[in-house]
Image (tube, helix red, strand yellow):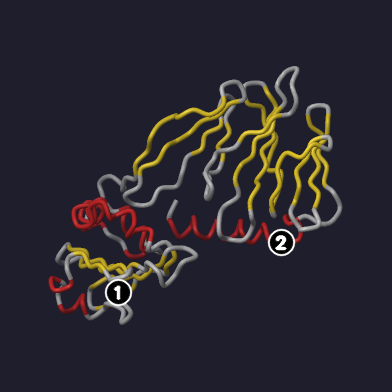
């Protein structure tokens, strides 16, 4: 899935949460479950309150039932719960009823952008979306054992891609450039431990532009434009990359005096 498509999908989901249907009207919603009933009501402060038979389970400005599915033979209800808007994706709250016990909830402790739940017959998996340079935990959950570490994943480009196979038409977002193995290897060598931070600064961006044989793109950290913006230049002929990132002082990779004149001429005036 390209970064541009993922961004479009996220924007569509955010728009859905703001719609009258997803935002929920004043009438309480109710769903039968495990011999009782879920309700979603709106409080005086406009927060939505999820309850089971009158007992509050969760609350936030956006609460929606996603699905009810069997996990290891136990019915589990999956709710999206979050602040709404576009700051953070909603978290997944799982609700189930253990034998001879009250309805119980579980969710990941991540404060923002919790991975979506991938539900199977035996486990629920939470696989994070990775930016270039990222490594993250994949966690699994089931109603019998709770959460566990399933594994660790690391961002990787498409095998077999190189400078010659770079296709501008297939890179609608600058982060898609890193899917090319040669570009990714060059970026790793040039940026080192700063790769993930620099890539984050390209999160909100338009498509790369081509000027005199050079590709260039500017982006910013989502919801924080103008703070740590990143600028990059790709020279396909020289098989070279150039990066700059704003901060208290703008950083350049390589140092600015090593940028060729054609690439330096593309640097935005506020860098």
Q: Which mark is residue 210?
A: 1
197 above or below 207?
above
Picture quadrant where residue 204 is located = bottom left
Q: Position of residue 250 (x, y in %)?
A: 28, 71
Q: Which residue is the site of mark 2?
A: 19
The answer to whether 2 appears left or right of 247 in the picture is right
Q: Which disc number belongs to residue 17?
A: none
Q: Which residue does the image show at 25% across and 66% down from the upper left?
A: 243
Residue in the image at 82% along x and 46% along y: 29
Q: Position of residue 97 (x, y in %)?
A: 72, 25
Q: Residues within 10 Å of mark 1 (few under 14, many from 20)?
A: some
Asked if disc 2 and disc 1 are in contact, CB closer than 8 Å, the reply is no
Where residue 252 sits, quadrant-wise, is bottom left
Residue 244 pos. (x, y %): 27, 68
The earlier-in-sequence mark between 2 and 1 is 2
Q: Is residue 269 above or below residue 238?
A: below
Separation (CA) of disc 2 from disc 1: 38 Å
**Residue, far right:** 27
Residue 1 pos. (x, y %)? 45, 51
21 and 90: which one is in front? 90
Is 234 located above or below residue 16 in the figure? Answer: below
| Residue extending farthest front | 248
**Residue positioned 18% across, 78% down in the render:** 262
């Amino acid at each position: 899935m390209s970064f541009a498509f993922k961004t479009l999908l996220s924007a569509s989901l955010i728009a859905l949460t703001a719609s009258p249907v997803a935002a929920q009207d004043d009438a309480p919603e109710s769903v039968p479950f495990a011999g009782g009933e879920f309700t979603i009501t709106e409080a005086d402060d406009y927060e939505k309150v999820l309850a089971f038979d009158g007992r509050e389970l969760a609350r936030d400005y956006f609460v929606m039932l996603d699905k009810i599915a069997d996990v290891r033979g136990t019915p589990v209800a999956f709710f999206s719960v979050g602040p709404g808007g576009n700051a953070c994706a909603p978290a997944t709250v799982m609700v189930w009823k253990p034998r001879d016990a009250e309805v119980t909830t579980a969710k990941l402790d991540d404060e923002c952008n919790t991975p979506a739940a991938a539900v199977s017959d035996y486990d629920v998996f939470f696989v994070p979306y990775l930016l270039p340079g990222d490594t993250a935990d994949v966690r699994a959950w089931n109603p019998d054992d709770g959460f566990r570490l399933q594994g660790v994943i690391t961002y990787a480009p498409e095998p077999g891609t190189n400078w010659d196979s770079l296709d501008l038409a297939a890179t609608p977002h600058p982060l898609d450039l890193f899917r090319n193995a040669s570009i990714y290897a060059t970026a790793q060598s040039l940026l080192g431990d700063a790769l993930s931070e620099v890539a984050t600064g390209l999160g909100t961006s338009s498509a790369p532009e081509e000027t005199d044989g050079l590709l260039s793109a500017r982006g910013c950290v989502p919801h924080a434009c103008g703070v740590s913006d990143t600028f990059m230049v790709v020279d396909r002929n020289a098989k070279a990359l150039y990066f700059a990132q704003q901060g208290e002082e703008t950083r350049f990779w390589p140092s600015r005096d090593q940028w060729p004149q054609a690439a330096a001429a593309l640097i935005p005036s506020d860098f």
